[in-house]
C-alpha cells in the first residue's frame, strides 16, 4: 500500500466526490428513462454500463484512501 501525501489525498477525495456525483446523476437518468418507458433500450444499457464503470473507479479510489487494517 502506497502512502499518499496530503496533496494527493485531497486530490483523490475531490475526484471521488466528482465520481460520486456522476454516479448519482446516471442513477437519476436511468430511473427517469425506466419510469417514462420511452427510453431506448440500447441507451439504457449504455447508461447502466457507464454507471458500473464509475462504481469500479469509485471503489479503486476508496480502497486507496482507506488504509488496510491488519486484524
Image: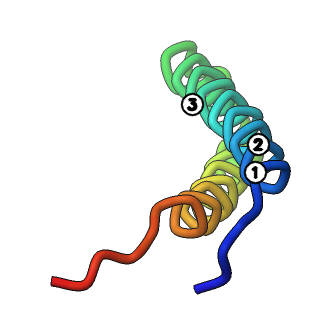
Residue shown at 77% from the left, 36% from the top = 14
Q: Mark 1 or mark 2, which is nearer to you?
A: 1
Find residue 27 and name its label. Answer: 3
Give the left or right position of residue 63, taking residue 20 as reference.
left
From the viewer's perspective, is residue 20 above or below residue 31? below
Give the left or right position of residue 15, taking residue 54 as reference.
right
Q: Which residue is identified by label 2?
A: 10
Q: What percent of the width, then of the height, locates residue 45?
A: 66, 53
How far apart are the two marked residues, 1 and 2, measured between alpha carbons? 6 Å
Residue shown at 66% from the left, 42% from the top = 44
Q: Mark 2 or mark 3, which is nearer to you?
A: 2
Q: Which residue is identified by label 1?
A: 6
Front residue (pair 31, 3):
3
Query: Nearer the N terminus, badge 1 or badge 3?
Result: 1
Give the left or right position of residue 30, taking residue 22 as reference.
left
Q: What percent of the width, then of the height, locates residue 8?
A: 82, 56
Residue at the farthest left position: 71
From the viewer's perspective, is residue 10 above or below residue 29? below
Q: What percent of the width, then of the height, locates residue 26?
A: 67, 32
- Quadrant (top left, top right, bottom left, bottom right) of the N terminus: bottom right
Residue shown at 66% from the left, 74% from the top = 3
Name which quarter of the figure residue 19 lies in: top right
Badge 2, how many Cα within 10 Å: few under 14, some, many 20+?
A: few
- Tell me whether circle 1 and circle 2 mark residues in contact (CB < 8 Å): yes
Amino acid at each position: 500500500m502506497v502512502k499518499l501525501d496530503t496533496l494527493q489525498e485531497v486530490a483523490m477525495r475531490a475526484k471521488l466526490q466528482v465520481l460520486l456525483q456522476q454516479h448519482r446523476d446516471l442513477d437519476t437518468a436511468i430511473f427517469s428513462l425506466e419510469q417514462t418507458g420511452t427510453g431506448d433500450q440500447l441507451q439504457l444499457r449504455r447508461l447502466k454500463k457507464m454507471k458500473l464503470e464509475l462504481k469500479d473507479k469509485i471503489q479503486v479510489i476508496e480502497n486507496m484512501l482507506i488504509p488496510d487494517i491488519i486484524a
